Image (cartoon, helix red, strand yellow):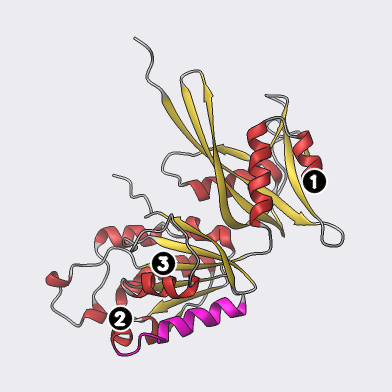
Amino acid sequence: MADAQVIVRAAGAVLWRHAKGKAIEIAIIHRPRYDDWSLPKGKLENGEMHIGCAFREVLEETGVTPIFGPEIGEVVYIVGNEKKIVKYWAAMASDIPYGQPDEHEVDEILWLEPTAAKKKLTLDDDRSIVDFFLDFGVDTQALVLLRHAKAVKREDWDGDDGDRPLAHVGQLQAKRLFPLYFPYAIKEIHSSDAMRCIETIEPMARTMQLTPIFSTDLSEFRYTKDKEAALDYAQDLLNRGVAGVICSHNPILPKLLKKLIGKKNFKQLDGKLEPGQSWVLHHRNGEIIAIDSIEIPQISA
């Protein structure tokens, strides 16, 4: 009987920086254990989600603190009975110091313009990821549309709906949001003034050392009276080019997204967000060029 195929999940990034003029360079690493040149990547740790893994691997393998852009693709490797699935993001190198990579894992890092990097890379799959990266382009900002975490059911709450808090599982979800959104270098956190939204973003805002901004314009109550208030609010953030989070409700967020993208078609989007789930809008000069879906934070049993 043949051994069952093992699924190995991994994540990485195309790490880039501005060179002279308008040129860009990307980082490739040499791994002495394999004697190859590759993009920074690695396996997910227990309970880790893909974007958190990709961020950690870039830190560990390059010593550079990245600022993440859109997810740009995935590759699949088959080695023996292992099927390795690797997701990749675009990530800009910041000037925040981190440290040096482990020389036993990575003994050399090269910054090369994309054509030279593709020639140096060992695997064709890595070269295809660089091509995907070039298709997306650089210098994007992220705007996160986050639905609040799991709340106490309406039928189980006797008070005002705006005061309805998170359920226990929602509290756990809220505590696990930080590693999912920290990679985007969030600068502002905006939230509906409903208690379930306030409780969702408070742990993340505290860890990021940001003062959240609460607005009734993002609430369900205001939406019933003025369907345009939330759109105007989000459009302002988009126009200002701020990396930010908007925490709000269904049905506000799906309709908000539809208006922001206009006639563009992003086929991967579902009709609504589940509690604790989000869409990340990657935009350049106010134009949305990619949308990622961030899944609900994993809760250990």
Q: Which residues are magenta?
A: 225-240
Q: Residue at x 30, y 61 (%)?
A: 170
Residue 229, relative to residue 99: is it above or below? below
User: Which quadrant of the view contains residue 278?
Assistant: bottom left
Residue 266, relative to residue 300: is it above or below? below
Residue on which the image places disc 2: 220
Outermost residue, right side = 20
User: Which quadrant of the view contains residue 156?
Assistant: bottom left
Q: Is residue 110 visible?
A: no
Q: Residues within 10 Å of mark 1 (few under 14, many from 20)?
A: some
Q: Position of residue 10 (x, y in %)?
A: 52, 38
Asked if the stretch drawn in magenta spans residue 118, the answer is no
Between the C-alphas of marks 1 and 3, the distance is: 35 Å
Amino acid carrying label 2: it is: Glu
Q: Residue at x 26, y 72 (%)?
A: 165
Kindly indicate whether the residue at mark 1 contacts the one at mark 2 (C-beta within 8 angstroms).
no
Kindly indicate whether the residue at mark 2 contacts the one at mark 3 (C-beta within 8 angstroms).
no
Residue on which the image places disc 3: 146
Q: Earlier in the sequence, mark 1 or mark 3?
A: 1
Q: Residues within 10 Å of mark 3 (few under 14, many from 20)?
A: many
Amino acid carrying label 1: it is: Trp
Q: Position of residue 203 (x, y in %)?
A: 42, 66
Outermost residue, top side = 1
Kindly indicate whether the residue at mark 3 contacts the one at mark 1 (C-beta within 8 angstroms).
no
Between the C-alphas of marks 2 and 1, the distance is: 48 Å
Q: What secondary structure characterizes most of the magenta part? A: helix
Q: Is label 2 in a helix, a strand or a loop?
A: helix
Q: Residue at x 54, y 41 (%)?
A: 74
